[in-house]
Image: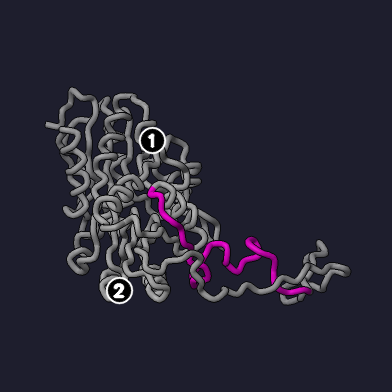
Amino acid sequence: MNIAKSGYRVFSANSSAACTELAKKITERLGVELGKSVVFQESNRETRVDVKESVRGQTIFIIQTIPRDVNTAIMELLVMAYALKTSCAKNIIGVIPYFPYSKQCKMRKRGSIVSKLLASMLAKAGITHIITMDLHQKEIQGFFSFPVDNLRASPFLIQYIQEEIPDYRNAIIVAKSPSAAKRAQSYAERLRLGLAVIHGEAQCSESDMADGRHSPPCVRNTTGHTGLELPPGKQQAPFPGIELPMMMAKEKPPITVVGDVGGRIAIIVDDIIDDVGDFVAAAEILKERGAYKIYIMATHGLLSADAPRLIEESAIDEVVVTNTVPHEVQKLQCPKIKTVDVSMILAEAIRRIHNGESMAYLFRNITTDD
């Protein structure tokens, strides 16, 4: 039984066996059994959850790792949280190591801030607290109406560098774009290493969107607004005396590497590695500049589409990610992919929250740039 006298229980909201591995590791460290529940998909792809034991008055932790089928995983989490809420659980705490839709946290043209929508849905389903790891933007915490503990994977990745990379003292930390420089600087300072930044890499940045809400338009003469409504098909006449300043169109500069990587081990750090095109291109540039080994360090290894093949064929020597996202299939396709286990810190976070202990210990020497 799942140690009812402890006052809390741990469930997994995943319907696939591959995604329950992290939940099993966490419960083993906590010394409890995984809660009895059945999560499955109906023939019409509806999600059904059956909780097989009483949860009345208990604090419940739902562990949900996010596989490739993101939307199904979200529905599993929402349906399980609502099932526990209607079963009179006292508190429902979501343990979501990789928070989905975190890249959609800013307005783009006429889109929407989907991570804000997801935060509202989780609250509506009954979740009262979130434990996650390395949010894509830390400001996402402000979207929630309940507490969020944003843990860090950097201590585990730094430990891997120190223990598993021979001659890491001859390494240099690399940011594959200027926007990743803060994270790279934090790693470099902790490891007492140098820092390099790749500038001019072709990428789709939020700040480069062709939208008047992000930057002034590139034309001088602009139609003004007279306050009069015109019939359909009629064009608004320019308002006299209105001229907006003309802005030069953005043009990406030639790719340059700021910093000396010649004869060094290059370690690229980031929070998510999904579409590996940018990382492969960065590795080629670093090889051309004289780096003799190239490592990629990232918290969340989504590794979508044909990422394993591209990594295997690239100049990258090793990709190191944590087990916040299941990627066993990708590891079979590409031996260069290595995994760091972070179940220890997740289990400790669960224990401390249940016992009402301070979480400060988990953030020792951690800064917002990590």
Residue 98, image x and y in percent?
Answer: 34, 50
Q: Of 190 and 302, which appears nearest the observer?
A: 190
The magenta stretch spans which residues?
191-220
| Left or right of 200 in this view: 49 | left
Q: What kind of element bears circle 1?
A: loop
Identified at 71% across, 70% down, the residue is 247
Is the Cβ of the residue at disc 1 closer than 8 Å to that at disc 2?
A: no
- Extreme residue in the top direction: 5
Q: Residues within 10 Å of mark 2 (few under 14, many from 20)?
A: some
Q: Quadrant of the N terminus?
A: top left
Give left or right: position of 251 versus 54: right
Residue 290 image offset from top left, x and y in percent = 39, 72
Q: Amino acid at mark 2?
A: Leu
Q: Earlier in the sequence, mark 1 or mark 2?
A: 2
Report x, y in % for residue 91: 33, 30
Residue appearing at x 27%, y 34% in the figure: 348
Identify residue type, mark 1. Arg
